[in-house]
Amino acid sequence: MRREILLAALLLGTSGLVAGCDQLKKVAGGKDVVVKETEFPERVLWGDTHLHTANSVDAFGFGVRLGPEEALRFARGEEVTSTTGLKAKLPRPLDFLVVTDHAEGLGATKALYDAPRLLIRDETMLRWYDMMHEGPAGSQRAMAEILDARGRNALPKAMLNQDGTAERTKSVWNGNIDAVERYNEPGKFTAFFGFEYTLMQGGNNLHRNIVFRDGPDRVRTVVPLDPTYKATPDEIWSYMEAYEKATGGRVLAIPHNSNLSNGLMFELTQPGGGPMTAAYAKRRARHEPVVEITQIKGDSESHPFLSPNDEFAGFGVAGWELNNLLGNQPKVSSMFAGEYVREALKRGLLLEQQMGVNPYKFGLIGSTDSHTALATADENQFFGKHTGNEPNPARATQEQNLGTRKGRFGWHYLASGYAAVWAKANTRASIFDAMARREVYGSTGPRMTVRFFGGWAFKENDLKGDWVRAGYRRGVPMGGELSASKKGAPSFIVSALKDPIGANLDRVQIVKGWVDKSGKLQEKVFDVVWSNPEKRKPAGGKVPAVGDTVNVATASYTNSIGAPTLAKVWTDPEFDPSVRAFYYVRVLEIPTPSWPAFDAVRYKLKLPPEVRVKQQERAYTSPIWYTPTKA
């Protein structure tokens, strides 16, 4: 009995934080810092709302040894050493970060790794312990078994937040809060409290990232909620409601990787079947104002099966359209409609038409979902999904056969993405409020500056004046809603500026979705403005390709094509005032090298022909919705 008590004490007491924290000082000597908000958002803030450290059960199992401390330092622009010993530094710091370690088994694999071997009696956990101590390869094999057990609901109880391990969760959570608070610097860098609610019954991804608006005093009153094999998100919404009622604080949830849910993320019915109720739809819309459209595990905008007329649909779907997250359930084409964001936005219109509430009226962001503690979405310094994918000669062609994920290879991972937020100040409150009102967009990595306004009286001449102020005063920004008007078709101001150190722009498109009068879901992509229009005349309703300057042999390109900025006032030529619709912007860069191309140059590799070596990176804005007057 004493043996078990000692082991439990060791497991419970492990915080997972890295030493050396005493060198840090609390911002402004521990005093509150007041940052004044601007009249309207004047610059876009870049961040990552989805990052894992050694406190995540899978990240540590994969081999990462960096904690929240290093994650925050890296995001702020400091140089850190990766788990595999490589120096890592962002060329430009981020403006904000949310460390979202998995609530499930928080700190469990690290605690197991640190425990004395002689105290471990569970044979399965002992095998995992030995495998993790073999080194990175053995640690990844152990994680494959842990994920497989998770998919079968067969994890040992000591790996979960059961049998007293709630104390371990509290210890790790409080340590994380301390680190986040030390690095939060209002006005300069915002560090949020958060965690990931890993809802994944049967391997179907229904994960949510939970982000708190508040400071440590309120957030310490709760601990991350473990889904413990739940099948629907009701429990996390109840947790959020209870937190807000008890503390007066605010919290939101961000669904991610809908492309790996096998059709369950954006259903037309209630979870489990039956007609969706207005109460359910209203609850979901309230708690989930933003969705992650792109990240390392693929892009979730649309699929060629759903959007056959969209030549740019299907970015980053390769490898991820085979099966669900754990690879234990094959995917069929009928599932795609419940997995991709554009179709979800259309389904939301249909459900609103039927019951008066739209559960899928959400904004769009990107984030990394990196399990290396390094929030980088740059192709030329992609550190991979986990430590096995940190830069090395084999990673692009290495099979990702964790569990039963057959058919996925390293090059299927994207170096994506980032969240762009139009906030009035770089503070928790301002950034959170911008996400809540959906004034956000997602990028696959490049830091393009994109503005999008909708209204009833915008003219081309508006671009010659203070059009940003006009956009806010006479219209609504991305994420906003237009009600019916007698002024004709709505007009939209769209402006895109290239990443200052990145590629020129190919084109700006507006994607429209609507429900026609027969009740069918419809969509259309409009090319609104593009580079070199005098040479690229539309033919057959399509704008010709921008060209390609990529030199794969050197992993380089030139900005001799494309444009540094594109702007336009556009009016929907097919507007029907009786039909509800949404509009969002997609901005495309000219072709650039992808991370496998940089690896090929760095390690002198000859890659198989199927490996993606170049691509057109992009940004997606939150939609603007139009709702007709009720009959």
Image (cartoon, rainbow, N blue to C red):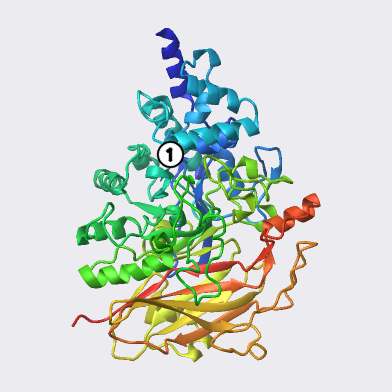
Q: Does any portion of residue 425 appear in the rendered image?
A: no
In which quadrant is the N terminus drawn?
top left
Percent from the top left, x then y, of residue 44?
Answer: 52, 65
Percent from the top left, x then y, of residue 607?
Answer: 74, 55
Asked if residue 398 is positioned above or below residue 611 in the image, the reply reads above
- CA neighbours of label 1 inside 10 A, class few (<14), some (14 to 19), many (20+): many
Q: Is residue 348 left or right of residue 535?
A: left
In which quadrant is the C terminus drawn?
bottom left
Residue placed most toward the observer, 31 or 455: 455
Residue placed most toward the observer, 251 or 444: 444
What's the residue at 56%, 89% (across, down)?
540
Identify the residue at the far top of this view: 2
- The residue labelled by disc 1 is 151
Name the kind of residue labelled 1 in the image: Gly
Residue placed most toward the observer, 493 or 1: 1
Percent from the top left, x then y, of residue 413?
Answer: 59, 53
Asked if residue 597 is positioned above or below residue 307 in the image, the reply reads above
Q: Is residue 172 left or right of residue 66?
A: left
Q: Secondary structure at mark 1?
A: helix
What's the residue at 76%, 62% (across, down)?
555
Percent from the top left, x then y, of residue 395?
Answer: 68, 47
- Image quarter for residue 217? top left
Q: Is residue 529 left or right of residue 592?
A: left
- Image quarter for residue 39? bottom left
Number of on-image labels:
1
Q: Does any portion of residue 9 appear in the rendered image?
A: yes
Residue placed most toward the observer, 405 or 372: 405
